[in-house]
Image (cartoon, grey):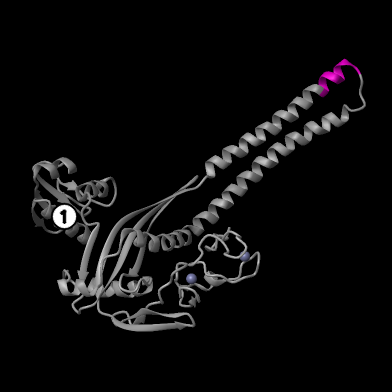
Amino acid sequence: MGELRDFVAGMLERQGAVVEALEPDGLVVLAPEPVRQTMGWPELARLGFGGQQPEGTVRIGLEGDWLDRFGALLGGHGCWAERQLKLPGTAAAPGAFRYTALSDEKREGLIWLGFNLGTGAVVDEVLARLRPVLLQEADWQAPDPAVRLAGGPAWQAAALEARLRPLLDHRVRQELEPFLRAMRRRLERDRNRVHAYHDDLRGASLKRLAALAGAAGEKAEADRRRETLRVATIEREYHVKLDDLRHNYALRVTVEWVQTLELYVPVQRFDVLIRRRKGERLIRLDWHPLARLAEPPPCDWGPGLDRTRLVCDEKLHLTEPAGQAACTSCGRAWCRACHPGACPRCGQAVERDRPRISG
Ligand SMILES: [Zn+2]
Ligand SMILES: [Zn+2]
């Protein structure tokens, strides 16, 4: 519980409280009014973070609604931060997003995305390697103005969103795949059960109807009418049950931004000139000495997570290979970054090239 205690102590101090450690795992807190109100504490509170606590101690843990209350205390703070690793460098901005998938069950998770604001490249892999380095570095150093300048101009919100959206989409699908697979299995099981039940009932009624086929007279006529009505009722009910299932298993996924950290890290930057018949284009590739890794080239179409890129002749876009693929209708290859909606020759709309979630 040491980390939780440190976190709580640090946060309360920032909110103007006077905090003193009480060994082995407690805090004494003299809190200002707003904090007392949010947390529901007396003016002088003893907080305990371990198992055995003396009488009158408020027990703080990960259970219950403590994290929600600390969250309320944080409010909008801590959503954006920047940090420089001692050497001068460029900016990479990892962002955290929370996703919630809701159908008959619920799944929540956090996704970290990182990309290089200097080159536009996705740097998830680099960041994964940088994280241990960051944790070792105890000093939180704000970037020098000169370093911030070297990191390049800030991105426009629209450009940032255009870059983030496909990445986020891809990652959320990836994360949710096991959840969706399990959900589809449950849906299939329920659908089969509903079908089997109604199919049995309907089968029995049809059999009775068949037996009545040759019979004449008033009673036989009444029986026939009753069985026919019953079959119609069974069919109607079957469709109602299917609708219920559809409703029950409908999936809603929401994604919200939680936090951004702008990180200034040293890089070795390479200028790469791409030349085609009609023109040339300069791109930048960074090598990250702290992670000992080169980042993948920038990508104008597709999430760009692997390293293969094709270049279009017209505007020298860099895309994933699928971004230059042949049209499924007329066979002509075209650039999805130049013509995002449809094939420029035959007008065939772009098929959803995103990775399908397999069931
Ligand atoms: Zn076409
Ligand atoms: Zn293009």
Please report the residue visible at 47 percent of the width from the left and 62 percent of the height from the top.
174
Q: Position of residue 223 (x, y in %)?
A: 82, 21
Say above or below: 246 vs 113: above
Q: Is residue 56 visible?
A: no
Was residue 345 drawn as part of the magenta stretch in this picture?
Answer: no
Say above or below: 79 vs 216: below
Q: 127 or 154: which is nearer to us?
A: 154
Placement of the N terminus among the 4 image quadrants: bottom left
Placement of the C terminus among the 4 image quadrants: bottom right
Disc 1 is placed on an element classified as: helix
Q: Position of residue 167 (x, y in %)?
A: 42, 63
Q: Position of residue 47 (x, y in %)?
A: 15, 50
Please report the residue visible at 54 percent of the width from the left and 72 percent of the height from the top.
324
Q: Is residue 110 visible?
A: yes
Q: Which residue is mark 1?
A: 11
Number of marks present in the image shown? 1
Please report the residue visible at 49 percent of the width from the left and 72 percent of the height from the top.
320
Main SS type for the magenta part? Answer: helix
Residue 113 lies in what quarter of the image? bottom left
Q: How busy is the neighbourhood of tag 1: few (under 14 within 10 Å), some, or many (20 plus)?
A: some
Amino acid found under the numbered disc labelled 1: Met
Q: Magenta stretch?
A: 217-224
Q: 81 or 18: which is nearer to us?
A: 81
Q: Residue furthest front?
A: 278
Please report the residue visible at 25 percent of the width from the left and 68 percent of the height from the top.
153
Say above or below: 170 vs 119: above
Task: Please give left or right for residue 165 compared with residue 157 in the image.
Answer: right
